[in-house]
Amino acid sequence: MVVRSAPRSDSDLFSQFFREFHETLEQASGPQFEKLFREFDAAFKESRTQRVDSTPHLDVLQVFGLGMDELRHSRVLSWFLDADAEHEQGVLFAQALLRLVAGEQAPEILDGEHYIVEREKHSRTDVSIYQRQRFAVFIENKVRASERTDQVKDMINSLVTLADAQRIPVSCRFAVFLTDDGREPTTKPSKDVSGFEPHNLKALSRVEVFDAFYRALSQRTASRLLTNLLFCYRNAIDQLRTL
C-alpha cells in the first residue's frame, strides 16, 4: 500500500509565514515596519475573534492526528455499524448502509437480530458486515492510498467465498469501494464473477455514507453528544476531499 504524505494545512503555512514575517521585521528598522506589524497583528486577532462562535477551521481528525490513518477510519465505520456499540442506536446505521447500497430492495434488520461486523478479516477486507442467509457487505476503505494489484477483485472473491458458506443470496452480496471522492476502483474484475452481480459493486465516498447515517439519526432520539460526534466527523472527512 502506497500512502502519500499528508499535505500541510493552511494554518501550518500561515503560521510559517507569520514566523518568517516576524523574523524579517526584527531585522528591519523604521517606523513603517512597526506600524505594518501592529496593523497585521490586530487584523489577525480580530479575524479570530469573529470566528469564535463558529470555529470553521476546526478539524477533529487533525486535532488527534488521525486525518490519513486508514485503520482509524475503518474503526470509526465499524463502530457505527456495530449494533452493540455505545452509540445505543442498535441496527440503525447498519440499516442505513444497506439502504444506501441496495436501495428499496435492502434487507430489513430487526432490532435484536444478530449480525457480524469485522475488520481486517477475509483476505484483510477493511470492514465486513454480514448476516447468515440474509446479506453481506464487504468494504475496501481507501484514504489517500493506491490500490494494490487485484485488490477489489480479491475482495469480491472473498465475499463470494463467505457468502456461499453463509448461504447468502447472490442479490444480497455487496462490495463497496469507499474513498474521499467516490471514484471507481481500477482493480475490479474484468469479467463477471460467478456468485456476484457486477452492479452490486458500489463506489461511494465516505461523506455519502456518513450523510446517510446522519439522516437516519435525525429521525431518532439521540444524545447531543452522539449527534455532535457524527456531525464533526462528517465535516472532517468532507475536508479530506479538498486536500
Image (cartoon, rainbow, N blue to C red):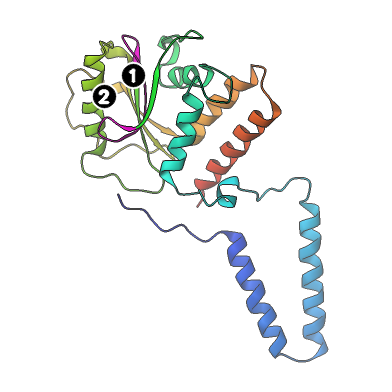
User: Could you tell me residue 83's position as x and y percent?
Assistant: 50, 19
**Amino acid at pointer 2:** Leu
Q: Secondary structure at mark 1?
A: strand
User: Could you tell me residue 4's position as x and y percent?
Assistant: 38, 56
Q: Is residue 57 left or right of residue 124?
A: right
- The span picked out in magenta is 120-136
Asked if the stretch drawn in magenta spans residue 127, the answer is yes
Instruction: Using the rendered view, name the quadrant where residue 26 is placed.
Output: bottom right
**What residue would you read off at disc 1?**
136
Q: Is residue 28 above or below residue 61?
A: below
**Residue 30 visible:** yes
Instruction: Using the rendered view, name the quadrant where residue 150 is placed.
Output: top left
Dot 1 alpha-carbon crowd within 10 angstroms: few under 14, some 14 to 19, many 20 or more: many
Dot 2 alpha-carbon crowd within 10 angstroms: few under 14, some 14 to 19, many 20 or more: many
**Residue 180 visible:** no
Q: CA distance from mark 2 to mark 1?
A: 8 Å
Asked if the stretch drawn in magenta spans residue 18, the answer is no
User: Could you tell me residue 187's position as x and y percent?
Assistant: 24, 38
Q: Nearer the viewer, residue 208 or 60?
A: 60
**Amino acid at pointer 1:** Ala
Q: Is residue 172 left or right of residue 55?
A: left
Q: Would you say the residues marked 2 and 1 are in contact, meaning their CB atoms lie under 8 Å apart? A: yes
Instruction: Mark 2 or mark 1: name the one nearer the start of the chain.
Output: 1
